Image (cartoon, rainbow, N blue to C red):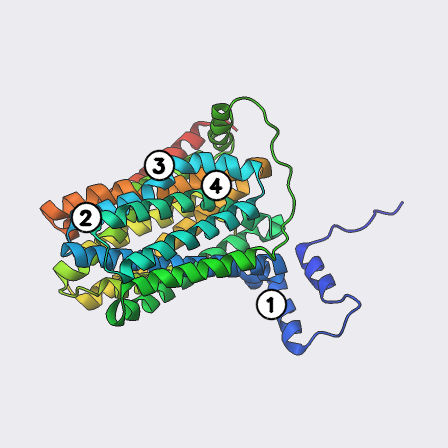
Amino acid sequence: MADGPAPRSPSDDYAEDYTDDVAAPSPIETRWAQMIRAPRGRAFRAWHHPEFRIVWSTFVVGQLGFWISFITFQALMARLTDSDGRWLGLLFFTNFIPMLVFTPFAGIVADRLERKRIMIVCYALLTVLMSVLAVLAFSGNVTPTTLLPFAFGIGTIFAFNAPAGQAVVANSVPAGDLTSAVSLQSAGANLSRVIGPTVAAPFLTLWNEGTAFALYAVTSVVVVWRLRRVNLSTYEPEEHVGSFWLRLRGGFDHARERPPALAALSVLCMSSLFAAGYLALLPVLSDQVYGRPRGFTTLAAVTGFGSMIGALTTGFREKEPTFTSATLLVAGFGVSLILLGRASSWPVAMAVMVLVGIFYFSAMTSLNTLIQSLADENKRGRIMSLFVIGWAGLVPIAGLWQGALAQRHGVQTTITVAGSVTAAYSLLVLVLRRRRRARIPV
């Protein structure tokens, strides 16, 4: 009796795509097909899918606009307040606190409504908000208190956009290419993080800050136009079962039922409560420690360069991310911040910032991929809302306490403390989890 057809591998699908009854592929296309079938080409396999390419390009353009505006917000607040750490910490808090408050609700919305439509509405609102802020900046009517509600508005829009934007990546590729898609998305985010501060610098030096805000409005229009063209895979939303709060709790219960998702989220949250707040202190670090008032844009760009390396390195790994590897990367992020807090000169600080970027985004990409791989599709929005809370929602709390601590005890001491707590907690969770698993009978 025949054994039946042999099981197909992902590489068979790629080979078939290039042997359809169409024009013969060019040598470049042939080499590309061979590369993505090879084990080392797995990092780029998501680019094989046209819908992912559209999602990726819109994400990069949107992130580019975000970093230009974020750096401009910080520079404008630093100029208006003479680099007051408390005002910068308050700006950071106001910008990111909506991620903590509204993201759980946004996760439910992302599981109930069309995710592409959510993203289009969010970027349309960003266009309006940044246009108004640009007009105020051009007219010279911006004060520290004026910036805060705009920062809150941007944070609120991103709180509703983030779960849909994270979940939509899984709707643009097959499950086997999810690691590649998440890695490329993270690499794109960090490419924007490198280019954004670099582009923002001449706007801050040569023109009014309103020019940068206007540029963000333009990039938001481009994102809306691109998103309208994408066709994503369909999924079955969860039926309306129980109350709103019961569905909200369902996301947490789902994470608890998918070990090690809950442990990974706890490590993520602790890193945001402490280590990730270093971004709020870059203007103070460059100005007060190294005497470079505009140098924080360089530090941000250097960190972004390291982050892009870290994200791509994660994608090139042949093995899927594990809780152990992700947690060790978070610990490495903490150690790199300890080195930053002890850096004695500007060149050393820039070199350490590359390490900060590598460890931070390697860790975040690994945690993102791990958590996404554990989620059911109809609960992915809520699972990713928990990720966004840990990744960005808790950062404003870090910015608030670190701004106050830096004002009293110095920015380098604050960064050292934040890195030490992050590294120690990550290693502690890893040890406790291994001991717990060792006690479980086989």
Write the residue at 56% across / 47% down. 117
In percent of width and height, residue 322 lies at 47, 45
Marks 1 and 4 sit apart, C-alpha to C-alpha, by: 31 Å
**Residue 100 position by quadrant:** top left
Give percent across and percent down for residue 421.
Answer: 25, 42
Whether residues under marks 1 and 4 lie with C-beta atoms below 8 angstroms apart, the answer is: no
Q: Is residue 313 visible?
A: no
Q: Residues within 10 Å of mark 1 (few under 14, many from 20)?
A: some
Task: Please tell me which residue is depicted at 44% across the width and 46% down the height of the picture.
Answer: 367
Provide the secondary structure element on which disc 4 rests.
helix
Q: Identify the element where label 3 is drawn.
A: helix
Q: Which residue is mark 2?
A: 87
- Mark 1 or mark 2, whichever is nearer to me: 2
Residue to which mark 3 is pinned: 429
* Mark 2 to mark 3 CA distance (whole Å): 34 Å
Marks 1 and 2, how far apart at CA: 50 Å
What residue did someone put label 1 on? 35
Residue at the farthest bottom position? 27
Q: Work out whether mark 2 precedes mark 4 in sequence or the reverse, and give the earlier one.
A: 2
Q: Which badge, 2 or 3, comes first in the chain's sequence?
A: 2
Provide the secondary structure element on which disc 2 rests.
helix
Q: In the displayed structure, does residue 212 sit left or right of residue 415? A: right
Q: What amino acid is at disc 4? A: Met
